[in-house]
């Protein structure tokens, strides 16, 4: 039996699998585990099942000790993990791609609808008890039919968002490190373009790229200025891909029409000016937040952990 440390609350289905083979020490607090507590708990662990709120770096790997074999992130994004630090010590790092694709695309498209149709504004107005009645020019938004969606990062979630956009009658352009499967591109009618063209032609820009040094503030003042002043920006990937201060200025001054954010630069803090603006929809990192999806993510993380501890290849290692 190996010692497996789980850094936060995860669904029982995943804990049951881990407990069937190993000695599991799972954090059960409703608040995130403190750094001090985490550093103390990982000592002697052969596996760490981590949440995206925990930083897995040299300090933590040192605290765990040389017997540590695997870090299994319960997330597709792994910017919380220093992957080279893991691989340099022979520790396998894994993530959970695939199982949260549809749920996250749902939230991306939900934000697109909320921003373009001003649903947040309408909801706030009613809840604030303001008087209103149907009016020809009351809370007019922007139609999606015939408009262009620009997808930045055309992996699984980008493609799933594009599928939804196609069903709403949108044209698709995308920017990605590589061409996607030609059959999928043909089915979506999706055209690969450079970022500057994408920003110039899109009515909605949706971000789906991973976060790292190459994508830090990928969308800043110049990129926002390159967008149409009628366009919307949606982010369900990672907050620091957008320069939030620049976005707030762009939204306030009409450089772009609106935005929808599920993730934030200094999560869980939100750049204060964004809270004052009507033309941005703000939701608290809900991309994968369905019972089914979170269960599938945790079970996949458990399977990754069990595989490495058995000396087998894990289903979804992080390949950089
Ligand atoms: C992920 O898996 O990276 C998501 O952000 C979690 O919701």
Image: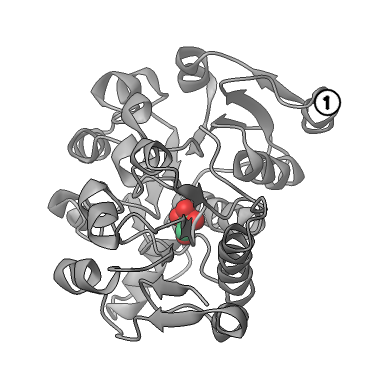
Near-viewer residue (142 or 58): 58
- Residue 180 lies left or right of residue 48; in this view the side is right
- Label 1 within 8 A of ligand 1 by Cβ: no
At which x and y percent is residue 62?
A: 24, 53
* Residue 136 showing in the rendered view: no
Near-viewer residue (238 or 297): 297
Colour style of the rendered protein structure: one colour
Near-viewer residue (183 or 299): 299
Q: Is residue 32 above or below residue 71?
A: below
Q: Residue at x 30, y 31 (%)?
A: 216
Q: Is residue 289 above or below residue 320?
A: below
Q: Residue at x 39, y 81 (%)?
A: 25
At label 1, counting other C-alpha atoms closer than 10 Å, the crowd grade (few under 14, some 14-19, many 20 or more) is few
Q: Secondary structure at mark 1?
A: helix
Specify the quadrant of the image occupied by residue 181: top right
* Residue 215 showing in the rendered view: yes
Q: Is residue 280 above or below residue 242?
A: below
Specify the quadrant of the image occupied by residue 268: bottom left
- Residue 187 lies left or right of residue 2; in this view the side is right
At which x and y percent is residue 100?
A: 60, 58
At which x and y percent is residue 273?
A: 15, 50
Q: How many marks?
A: 1
Q: Residue at x 40, y 41 (%)?
A: 83
Which residue is tagged 1?
186
Specify the quadrant of the image occupied by residue 8: bottom left
- Residue 43 lies left or right of residue 112; in this view the side is left
At which x and y percent is residue 317?
A: 58, 46
Near-viewer residue (38 or 208): 38
Q: Residue at x 47, y 77 (%)?
A: 10
């Amino acid at each position: 039996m190996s010692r497996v440390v789980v850094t936060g609350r995860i669904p029982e289905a995943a804990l049951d699998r881990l407990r069937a083979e190993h000695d599991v020490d799972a954090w059960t607090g409703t608040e995130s585990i403190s750094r001090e507590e985490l550093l103390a708990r990982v000592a002697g662990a052969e596996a760490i099942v981590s949440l995206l709120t925990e930083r897995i770096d040299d300090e933590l790997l040192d605290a765990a000790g040389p017997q540590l074999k695997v870090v299994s992130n319960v997330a597709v994004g792994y910017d919380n993990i220093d992957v080279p630090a893991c691989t340099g010590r022979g520790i396998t790092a894994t993530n959970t791609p695939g199982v949260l694709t549809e749920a996250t695309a749902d939230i991306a498209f939900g934000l697109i609808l909320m921003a373009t149709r001003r649903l947040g504004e309408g909801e706030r107005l009613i809840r604030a008890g303001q008087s209103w009645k149907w009016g020809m020019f009351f809370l007019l938004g922007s139609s999606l039919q015939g408009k262009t969606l620009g997808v930045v990062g055309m992996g699984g979630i980008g493609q799933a968002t594009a599928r939804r956009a196609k069903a709403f009658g949108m044209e698709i352009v995308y920017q990605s490190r590589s061409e996607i499967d030609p059959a999928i591109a043909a089915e979506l009618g999706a055209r690969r373009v450079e970022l500057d063209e994408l920003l110039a032609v899109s009515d909605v820009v949706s971000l789906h790229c991973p976060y790292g040094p190459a994508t830090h503030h990928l969308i800043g003042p110049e990129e926002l200025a390159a967008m149409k002043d009628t366009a919307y920006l949606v982010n369900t990937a990672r907050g620091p891909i957008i320069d939030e201060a620049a976005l707030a200025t762009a939204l306030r001054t009409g450089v772009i029409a609106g935005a929808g954010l599920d993730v934030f630069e200094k999560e869980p803090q939100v750049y204060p000016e964004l809270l004052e603006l009507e033309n941005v929809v703000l939701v608290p990192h809900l991309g994968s937040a369905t019972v089914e999806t979170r269960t599938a993510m945790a079970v996949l993380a458990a399977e990754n952990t069990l595989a490495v501890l058995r000396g087998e290849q894990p289903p979804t290692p992080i390949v950089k």
